[in-house]
Image: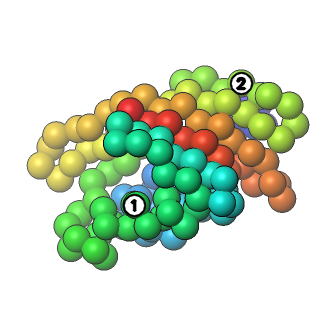
Amino acid sequence: MNATRQAIAKAMDDSAAAWTAGDLDGFMRLYEDAPTTRYINAHGMVTGYAAIRAAYAPRFSAATGKPMGKLRLELIDVQQLGPQHAFVIGRYHLAQPDGSEATGITTLLFHAHDGQWHIVVDHTS
């Protein structure tokens, strides 16, 4: 496994662990804190780190009082697009407390900044 794939895998694992723990700030560390960061899903597009954080906030344990479920992010493919960018295809697995599982594909554009890899575009379906 090359260094970029390892670094992205670790960042994704850390973010998934934060989700499972109900830690919104820890989960959001995976996203680049920039006004141009984008999150796209079946409901549309959210632009900007602060707006993405606000969109996720109501789902977290502190807001709902309910368990988050256990999130696992699987790397399927990582393509380096130069020294500062990588295109990632992954799959999320969210095991719910009731035993059900939500799963889907995600395509991500990562940007390396200050030695860390962060999502700048997230399309999850």
Q: Is residue 49 above or below residue 10?
A: below
Instruction: Please report the residue visible at 57 percent of the width from the left and 48 percent of the height from the top.
Output: 38
- Residue 79's disc number: 2
Q: Is residue 17 above or below residue 45?
A: below
User: Is there CB contact under 8 Å for labels 1 and 2?
Assistant: no
In the image shown, does 50 or 67 lie closer to the viewer?
A: 50
Residue drawn 28% across the image and 74% down it = 63
Q: Secondary structure at mark 1?
A: helix
Decide if residue 50 is in sight here.
yes
Residue beneath the point at 63% across and 52% down: 37
The kind of residue on which mark 1 rests is: Tyr
Task: Tell me the kind of residue under disc 2.
Answer: Gln
Q: CA distance from mark 1 to mark 2?
A: 27 Å
At 49% from the left and 51% from the top, the residue drawn is 46
Give the quadrant of residue 55: bottom left
Mark positioned earlier in the residue sequence (1 or 2): 1
Q: Is residue 95 above or below residue 91?
A: below
Comparing 98 with 46, the one in front is 46
Residue bearing the label numbered 1: 56
The answer to whether residue 49 is left or right of residue 62 is right
* SS class, disc 2: strand
Q: Label 1 neighbourhood size at 10 Å, few (<14), some (14-19), many (20+)?
A: few
Looking at the image, residue 83 sits to the left or right of residue 101; the answer is: right
Quadrant in the picture for the N terminus? top right
Q: Is residue 4 left or right of residue 9?
A: right
Disc on res. 19: none
Location of residue 31 in the rendering, given as x and y in whole percent from the top left corner: 60, 55
- The image shows residue 15 at horizontal and vertical percentages of 52, 55
Percent of width and height locating residue 25: 51, 70
85 or 38, nearer to the observer: 38
Left or right relative to 100: residue 94: right
